[in-house]
Structures are given as structure tokens and as C-alpha cells.
């Protein structure tokens, strides 16, 4: 009878080593593909929410939906929204509870236009949270003192979005978690107000008043470092440290307010 041959221990170890090397090479590529898929879903969600935002204005004499969570029917202070239900309704409590968030979504002014809670959340969001998106301060959200009365900065009606054009004015941003009121960036100071979010790589996903959505990649290493350092918290009033970091700030301020309310030191 002939001898039976099999794999030796050395041969098995070599095969296992080769498989391990291949996995090490392929996993980053697979993760990138997976992340790109999540980014595509996030961009689609933002586009759908922005189309709902446009439809709401069409149905309400061009008045924008109340963009400030917690400011429904507010008549004093920064929230001047008499008779306006916030796009997501409810008090600034319970944001660590998915059920409370989902109810706030269903009570909000955009729910009749987007009746799917999954569209209010990026697929990379945490399981216990139902929301990751916010409306920009400028879009009929919180009207704070630096922009009160500044035409073209704080927007109440869609017809006011003229200079720059709607394609350059931000509406929604993927903040990564749900914070009270809206996403803010200074108008008259060379600083961030809320900290820059980092989502889907070294940037964030946003949408614009003409209905399109995009991913902005931060140019400044300091912007990315700051975003990761304070992720899911707000320390606020941060000043960039590099030329590229200042460009990130200017880009966000112009997208939010349409212009800078000051003379930049790093043009």
C-alpha cells in the first residue's frame, strides 16, 4: 500500500500566515467600502430632509420651518418663533433616550413630509440615539444678538436666500449626536461656536438650500484634531491654529451666514 500524505505543521502555519497577511491587506479596503456605503446613506438622508424643508416652505408662504429644537412657539429671547412648531419638537431633555427622541421627531413640523425615523439619523449613529442631524443657526433657528437685523445672515424666508445663492447656503449638518436648538458658528468673531464635527472620515456631511448634499473634508489638521478631541461634547469658542484651520472656519461661517461679519486675519 502507498503512503498517505498530508499537510505538515510547517505547511499549515505558512498557509495561516498567508491568510493573515491577506486579511490585513483586505480589511482596510473592506472598511473603506463599508464606510462609503454609510456615507452614501447619510447624504441621501440629508437630501431627503432638505427636500422636506423646501416643501414645508412651499406650503407656508415661503416661511422656513422652525430650525431650533426646544423653541416651538417661542416669543422671547433668541427664539422668536410665535406659532411655529420646531422641525423636531420637544424640550431639551431625554436626548439619551431613543424613545423620547423618536417621539420628538413625530411631533415635529417636518414629520408629515418625512415619516421615517431612520432618515433623521446617520447609519453611524449610536444605537440609543434616534437623531444625529441639526439645522444651521441661520436658517430660522436661534436668532442671536450678532445676527439680529442682519439681512442675508439670519434667514426667515426662502426668498431671502439670494446672495450668495441657495447652492452655497447650508441647511442641515451631520453633527453626530443630537444637541438642543441648532448648530451654531460665530458670525462676527473669528472662532467656532459649536465645535467642528468629524463624520465619515476627516470631515462632515452637509446639505444646501437648493436641495443637494455633500461631504466636506477638513483641510486643517488642527480642525480634525479638535473635532476628535471634543467629539459628542461642546466646549465651544475654539480658535484655529493653522492657516488651513482658518480656511475651514471661514468655509463653515460663509456656508452658514452667507458672509463673514468681520475682517478675516488669514484671508
Image: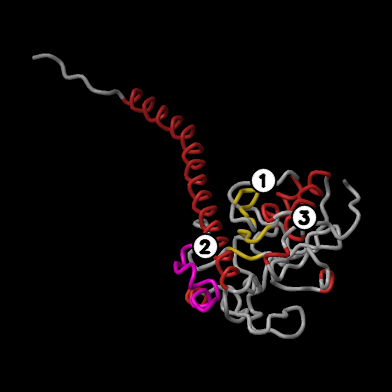
Residue located at (33% from left, 27% from top): 12
Q: Residues within 10 Å of mark 3 (few under 14, many from 20)?
A: some
Instruction: Kindly report the distance in space between the C-alpha atoms of the residues bearing marks 3 and 2.
Output: 25 Å
Specify the label residue 254 is tagged with. 3
- Sequence-wise, which precedes: disc 3 or disc 2? 2
User: Quick one: SS at disc 1?
Assistant: strand
154 vs 96, left or right, is: right
Residue located at (61% from left, 53% from top): 205
242 vs 2, left or right, is: right
Instruction: Kindly report the distance in space between the C-alpha atoms of the residues bearing marks 3 and 1.
Output: 16 Å
Q: In this view, does 191 lie above or below 241?
A: below
Q: Is residue 112 magenta?
A: yes
175 vs 256, left or right, is: left
Q: In this view, does 131 lie above or below 22?
A: below
Residue placed most toward the observer, 256 or 59 = 59
User: Marks 3 and 2: CB-CB under 8 Å?
Assistant: no
Q: Residues within 10 Å of mark 2 (few under 14, many from 20)?
A: many
Q: Does the magenta stretch include residue 34?
A: no
- Give the labeled residue for mark 1: 217
Q: Position of residue 42 (x, y in %)?
A: 53, 54
Quarter of the image containing the N terminus? top left
- Give the labeled residue for mark 2: 121
Magenta residues span 103-119
Residue located at (52% from left, 56% from top): 124
Q: Where is residue 41 in the image (x, y as percent from the top left)?
A: 49, 52
Instruction: Kindly report the distance in space between the C-alpha atoms of the residues bearing marks 1 and 2.
Output: 20 Å
- Sequence-wise, which precedes: disc 3 or disc 1? 1
Amino acid at each position: 500500500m502507498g503512503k498517505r500524505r498530508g499537510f505538515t505543521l510547517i505547511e499549515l502555519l505558512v498557509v495561516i500566515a498567508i491568510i493573515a497577511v491577506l486579511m490585513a491587506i483586505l480589511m482596510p479596503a473592506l472598511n473603506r467600502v463599508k464606510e462609503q456605503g454609510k456615507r452614501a446613506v447619510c447624504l441621501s438622508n440629508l437630501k431627503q430632509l432638505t427636500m422636506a424643508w423646501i416643501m414645508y416652505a412651499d406650503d407656508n408662504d415661503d416661511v422656513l420651518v422652525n430650525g431650533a429644537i426646544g423653541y416651538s412657539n417661542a416669543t422671547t429671547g433668541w427664539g422668536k418663533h410665535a406659532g411655529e412648531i420646531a422641525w423636531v419638537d420637544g424640550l431639551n431633555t431625554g436626548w439619551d433616550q431613543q424613545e423620547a427622541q423618536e417621539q420628538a421627531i413625530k411631533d415635529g413640523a417636518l414629520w408629515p413630509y418625512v415619516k421615517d425615523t431612520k432618515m433623521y439619523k446617520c447609519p453611524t449613529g449610536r444605537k440609543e440615539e434616534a437623531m444625529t442631524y441639526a439645522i444651521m443657526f441661520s436658517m430660522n433657528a436661534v436668532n442671536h444678538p450678532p445676527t439680529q437685523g442682519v439681512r442675508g445672515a439670519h434667514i426667515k424666508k426662502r426668498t431671502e436666500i439670494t446672495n450668495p445663492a441657495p447652492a452655497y447656503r447650508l441647511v442641515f449638518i451631520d453633527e453626530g449626536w443630537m444637541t438642543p436648538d441648532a448648530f451654531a458658528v460665530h458670525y462676527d468673531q473669528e472662532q467656532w461656536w459649536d465645535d467642528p464635527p468629524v463624520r465619515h472620515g476627516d470631515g462632515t456631511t452637509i446639505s444646501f438650500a437648493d436641495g443637494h448634499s455633500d461631504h466636506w473634508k477638513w483641510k486643517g489638521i488642527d480642525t480634525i484634531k479638535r473635532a476628535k478631541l471634543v467629539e459628542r461634547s461642546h466646549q465651544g469658542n475654539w480658535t484655529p491654529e493653522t492657516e488651513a484651520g482658518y480656511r475651514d472656519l471661514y468655509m463653515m461661517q460663509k456656508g452658514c451666514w452667507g458672509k463673514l461679519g468681520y475682517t478675516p486675519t488669514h484671508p
